[in-house]
Image (cartoon, grey):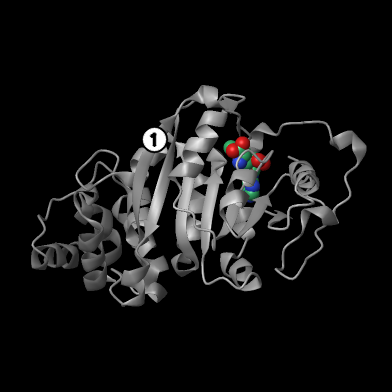
Amino acid sequence: MFAIPHIRHDSTGLAPAAAFTYPRIRLATRRRPKLGQHFLTSDAYRRRIVEALALGPDDLVIEIGPGQGAMTGLLAERASQVVAVELDPDLAGKLARQFADALNVEVITADILEVDVGKICRAHGAAAAFVFGNLPYYITSPILHHLLEAPERIRALACVVQLEVAERITAQPGTRDYGYLSVLAQLHSHPRLRFRIPPGAFSPPPAVVSALVTFDMKSGDMLAGRAPVDEARQGDFLAFVKASFAQKRKTLANNLAGKYGADRVHGALRSLGIRENARAEELSVAELSGLFRRLA
Ligand code: SAM
């Protein structure tokens, strides 16, 4: 691990990359494999990705892990403002210098998991942001969790993830890949697997195939109060979903019996017209939320 330097905060509460001093010895292109640093070097895929994003000229883009800026310039050409959040201070410093003359690119040295998307939106006078990232794969789930916890601040989301995760995010009930990540993503969005990206498009190549997933947010539902679960209860619902999928080989009733009692769970399943020996992966987001409302 490496030490994150002392952070000086700006108006967004975060640290502008240019605020740091960079000892020369650390400026070499040292790669930090632990930070999931696989840089997108294929120009063809960079263009294919940016063209798949429904970006508009008024968009505020928050880019997760810009790295060496493979996507940053392309995003800045199409959006009003790009706020690039990079954890590695060496990369962030270089990027800040690279974009020093670009009026619409701001580089922040921070952990995306600590970043308050709402705060960045407010600082830029935007209601919501378009969030994009070629994600560091070691924290894909925590990042999605963090972002989707405040869905009203996200106009749209798009990310490059490993193919296996893309398949889980977009899986439908009744399929092998359907699980917690699918419910988390589909609670507030319509995620779509757009295309695969081979390891050779990155340097160094990761061990796995990647894919671009775009998430169209269900913001209309939220605003109209038609969300499957009240915003205030979303955390409890996600904990309930986690418990429902806790042991995939067990029935849903067995997974939930410890907490709610077998009789109550069976009664709730019957009243919803769901088979009592169903497994969690057979239930849609609407069915899981219906069960949650009856039990929790
Ligand atoms: N966007 C660049 C590209 O497409 O070439 C780099 C993508 S690389 C897969 C992931 C990037 O995320 C790296 O630059 C890494 O340093 C950065 N990163 C890792 N953990 C992070 C975190 N918690 N917050 C912000 N950035 C992070």
Q: Residue at x 78, y 65 (%)?
A: 9
Q: Position of residue 283 (x, y in %)?
A: 20, 54
- Residue 83, percent from left and from top: 65, 57
The residue positioned 51% from the left and 51% from the top of the image is 142
Q: What residue is shown at x 22% (from left), y 62% (from top)?
A: 286
Residue 136 lies, in percent from the top left, at 57, 41
Q: Residue at x 48, y 40 (%)?
A: 49
Percent across and percent down for residue 180 are 35, 51
In the rendered view of the protein, which quadrant contains the C terminus?
bottom left
Q: Indicate whether 294 appears above or below 194.
A: below
Ligand 1 resides in the quarter of the picture at top right
Q: Secondary structure at mark 1?
A: strand
Q: Which residue is denoted by mark 1 in the rendering?
A: 195
Q: Height in image: 28 above or below 13?
A: above
Depth order, front residue of 135/180 = 135
Q: Nearer the viewer, residue 2 or 202?
A: 202
Q: Would you place residue 270 above or below residue 24 in this image? A: below
Q: Amino acid at mark 1?
A: Phe
In the shown orientation, is residue 214 left or right of residue 178? right
Frontmost residue, 149 versus 19: 19
How packed mark 1 is, by other alpha carbons closer than 10 Å (few <14, some 14-19, many 20 or more), is some
Q: Quadrant of residue 268?
A: bottom left
- Above or below: residue 178 compared with residue 238: above
* Residue found at the far right of this picture: 24
Whether residue 231 is visible: yes
